[in-house]
Image (spheres, rainbow, N blue to C red):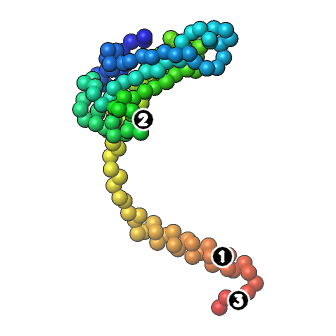
Amino acid sequence: MSGPHVIRGSVVLPEAELVWRFSRSSGPGGQHVNTSDSQVELRFDLARTKALPPVWRERAVERLAGRLVDGVLTVRASEHRSQWRNREIAAVRLTALLAEATAPPPAPRRKTRIPRGINERRLREKKQRGDTKRGRSGRDWG
């Protein structure tokens, strides 16, 4: 594989905790497709891993709860005919998923007020525009 699977900073997924499974892929490939196991399934036990800091692990388990089966995160790749390329894609997808799921929450939004002068100017301009339009009709509005 192409080097360590870095999530963020110095946190790396250990190869020992990754479980690879290969099976026959559907799609193009001719006679070759019937004999080669090019589809890749990569599994990572997120709930029990020691590779992630506890805070990250809890955050990831919470955010990826819909994708987990018994605490295990599964990623599939079968786009390419080559098992090697599918392995690379699956690893990249897994690290991207974990990087996004372990990211700290965004800073809370601070409420801001519209300055009174801006609001008054907006209302004044609306009034002028209405008067202009009213003046275009031939009626006398009183």
Q: Nearer the viewer, residue 37 or 106?
A: 37
Under mark 2, the amino acid is: Arg
Q: Which image quarter is the C terminus in?
A: bottom right
Q: Nearer the viewer, residue 46 or 56?
A: 46
Q: What secondary structure is found at the residue carrying circle 3?
A: loop
The residue drawn where x is 28% and y is 36% is 58
Quadrant of the image occupied by residue 65: top left
The residue drawn where x is 42% and y is 10% is 1
Neighbour class for label 2 at 10 Å: few (<14), some, many (≥20)? few
**Between disc 1 and disc 3, whose residue precedes?**
1
Q: What secondary structure is found at the residue carrying circle 2?
A: loop
Label 2 sits on residue: 67
Under mark 1, the amino acid is: Thr
For residue 130, side relative to residue 44 (left or right) = right
- Which dot, 1 or 2, sits closer to the camera? 2
- Residue lying furthest bottom: 142
Under mark 3, the amino acid is: Asp
Q: What secondary structure is found at the residue carrying circle 1?
A: helix
For residue 26, side relative to residue 77 (left or right) = right
* CA distance separating discs 1 and 2: 59 Å
**Between disc 1 and disc 2, whose residue precedes?**
2
Label 1 sits on residue: 132
Label 3 sits on residue: 140
Relative vertical location of residue 138 with respect to residue 94 in this rendering, above or below:
below
The residue drawn where x is 62% and y is 12% is 33
* CA distance separating discs 1 and 3: 13 Å
The residue drawn where x is 66% and y is 76% is 132
